[in-house]
Each structure stands twice: as C-alpha cells, then as structure tokens.
C-alpha cells in the first residue's frame, strides 16, 4: 500500500524518511534522527559561542555533554 513501510535488502524505509543517494550508496534518515541531529548542532554551536566568550572548555562543553547523554539514552 502507498505510505506503508517497505523493506529493501533487510533495511526498512518508512514514509517520511529522508533518502540521500550517490554513486557509492544510500543513507536513510528518519525524521526523529534528523531532529536529534538538529539538537546536536545547536549544542555544538553553544559550545563554540561559550568558548568565544571566554568560558573554560569544561564549562562550555557541559550543555553539549548533557545533550549527548540524553540523545544516547534514547537508543
């Protein structure tokens, strides 16, 4: 049926997944993974901004470490 998940070579592709292809292969990213990647990007930008404002690395990295821990807990 249209919109139902399909399995291609033991990989499930669902409606809404983003597929990126080139001559070397295909990457499939679900909307959830893309949202998590965006959260990671924001956390990384906050580290850079904090470092530029003079914060020590340990302080600057704290928010990113919390974000990474939360994202990993979801796996």
Image: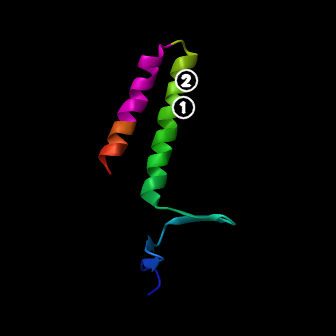
Label 1, label 2: how many angstroms apart (C-alpha)?
6 Å
**Magenta stretch: includes residue 58:** yes
Q: Around disc 1, counting alpha carbons within 10 Å, would you say few (fewer than 14), some (14 to 19), or many (20 or more)?
A: few
Counting from the top left corner in percent of width and height, residue 68 is at 39, 38
The foreground one among 22 and 31 is 22
Which of 9/27 is in front? Answer: 9
Which residue appears at 42% of the width and 56% of the height?
32
Q: Which stretch did the figure color magenta?
A: 55-67
Q: Quadrant of residue 27?
A: bottom right
Residue 64 pos. (x, y %) = 43, 31
Under circle 2, the secondary element is helix
Magenta includes 66?
A: yes
**What colouring does the structure picture have?**
rainbow
Q: Would you say the residues marked 1 and 2 are in contact, meaning their CB atoms lie under 8 Å apart? A: yes
Mark 1 lies on residue? 45
Query: Residue 58's spot in the image, x, y percent?
Result: 42, 18
Q: Position of residue 35 (x, y in %)?
A: 46, 51
**Against 15, is 60 above or below?**
above
- Element at badge 1? helix
Residue at (30, 45) in percent of width and height? 73
The mark found on residue 49 in the picture is 2
């Amino acid at each position: 049926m249209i919109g139902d998940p399909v399995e291609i070579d033991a990989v499930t592709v669902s409606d809404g997944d983003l597929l990126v292809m080139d001559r070397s292969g295909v990457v499939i990213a679900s909307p959830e993974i893309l949202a998590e990647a965006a959260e990671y990007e924001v956390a990384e930008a906050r580290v850079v901004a904090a470092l530029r404002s003079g914060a020590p690395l340990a302080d600057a990295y704290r928010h990113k470490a919390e974000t990474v821990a939360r994202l990993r807990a979801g796996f």
